[in-house]
Image: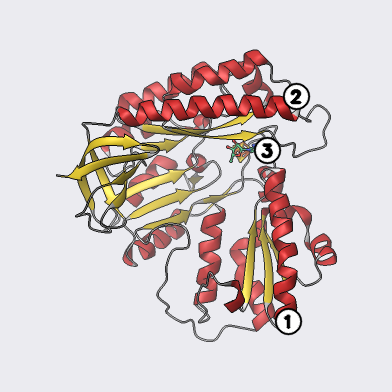
Amino acid sequence: MNEADSENIAATFRRRGYSVTDDIKKADAVVVNTCTVRQRAEDKAISQIGRLRLWKENKPEGKLFVVGCAAQKLGTKYLKSRFPFINEVVGARAIEHFEDALEAQYGPAEAAIEASHRNLFRSPQTAYVTIMRGCSLKCSYCIVPAVRGPASFIPATEILEDARAKLAAGAKELVLLGQTVNSWRRDGATFSELLREVLRLPGLGRLRFMSPHPLYFDEDFTALLAREKKLARHLHLPVQSGSDRILKAMRRGYSRAQYLDLLARLRAAAPDLAVSTDFIVGYPGETEADSRDTLSLVKEGRFSLAYCFKYSPRTDKPGMKASIGEAEMEARLEKLLAAVRENSRVVLNERIGKIEKVLFETETYGRASGNFAVRVKAGGIPGKISAVLVDGAEKNTLNGKLI
Ligand code: 5AD
Ligand code: SF4
């Protein structure tokens, strides 16, 4: 979500004739897009802003914008009093209206400039399309609903217009985005119906979405997944824990068995589906036994990849402090990371001898439908989807030959 917001912010600058630079000394403006999902993210944002004091001293006319979730949480008053050199604070809830902050600093825009653009995070053939903002669930550990507010769904017409424009500008692959992306519903239309509309757009080679929540997949979706080969054979489906007790305390709304049952249904529809996930380690009250349940789920879920996070308290509510010490937290994380690494190796090796449809970003590198990084010696055409016979795997990459 933050990457997509950063792309949109960069676009508002480009329309005023600015371009993006990696060299801070050359920058006339700096935008710090912040995250607060874990305390560490917030701390990093704060120290990044602190480091910009020097830049601002050397370039007093430079403009500093602090935006996003940590900006929303900490507030303009706090940030401007601690860092008086900030020009504008734009919280996550107002980030679609970043243009207003530009106007406050530079005055109204003259005629918009058509500028060639490069993606900041993804290759040019991939574009993000935000379809919802906020979240209406109440996972106990999560700060997102408080910071970004309840779910709001963008109308289908706007989504399709955005998607069409990005395809016309050369994107081959779209990534629909939202905190609980598959909960999208608007004007009587469901998420699967929206997918069908997007899948019909000319120029689309592949469709992804991120991140779905297990509660919102229905039979209509599984049927669509089975039929529509342009739907990526990959889902990032955060599970958070393998222990029923912890899942319940987290208020995730499903049990381990229900999650696994969903995976089985999805894989029955798309046998080559790759599934990645998120885990939180050391949730309050997590016992050795709970953490073993998480370890065993890694294998049972056959996850291609898993992001593992140490629990970070985001509230002062009683009972929400971590109940294990830092050393134990580290030890559980290390064990989980090792299990994930080993499992990813197995899942990747299963692809050897198979044919993957790869969207190339360079002549030698691209991404498979299952989201695996793929390398070939030569011959890939950037922006084209080609078949690759996989003949090896290392780390998180498949190696193969174009066929
Ligand atoms: N502590 C640790 N990890 C968290 N996440 C969300 N909130 C917290 C927290 N308080 C993780 C979840 C989520 C991912 C985006 O961040 O795993 O899926
Ligand atoms: Fe947070 Fe995701 Fe749960 Fe919403 S669904 S509360 S964003 S973890």
Residue 196 appears in view: yes
Left or right of 308, for residue 352: left
State which mark lies toward you, 3 or 1. Answer: 1
Asked if 95 appears above or below 180 in the picture, the reply is: below
Q: Are marks 2 and 1 in contact (CB under 8 Å)?
A: no
Q: Residues within 10 Å of mark 1 (few under 14, many from 20)?
A: few
Q: Is residue 50 left or right of residue 117?
A: right
User: What secondary structure is found at the residue carrying circle 3?
Assistant: loop
Foreground pick, 131 / 347: 347
For residue 380, which quarter of the picture?
A: bottom left
Nearer the observer, 259 or 79:
79
Tag 2, which secondary structure?
A: loop
Residue wearing tag 3: 142
Looking at this rendering, what residue extends furthest in the bottom direction?
A: 110
- Measuring from the top left, give residue 219's x and y in whole percent: 38, 28
Q: Which residue is mark 2?
A: 324
Mark 2, residues whose alpha carbon is within 10 Å: few (<14), some, or many (≥20)? some
Looking at the image, the residue that sits furthest to the left is 403
Q: Kindly indicate the quadrant of the structure image that contains residue 27.
A: bottom right
Say which label, 3 or 1, has the lower sequence index: 1
C-alpha separation, residue under disc 2 versus residue under disc 1 = 47 Å
Mark-to-mark CA distance, 3 and 2: 19 Å
Q: Residues within 10 Å of mark 3 (few under 14, many from 20)?
A: some
User: Where residue 60 is drawn, which disc sits there?
Assistant: 1
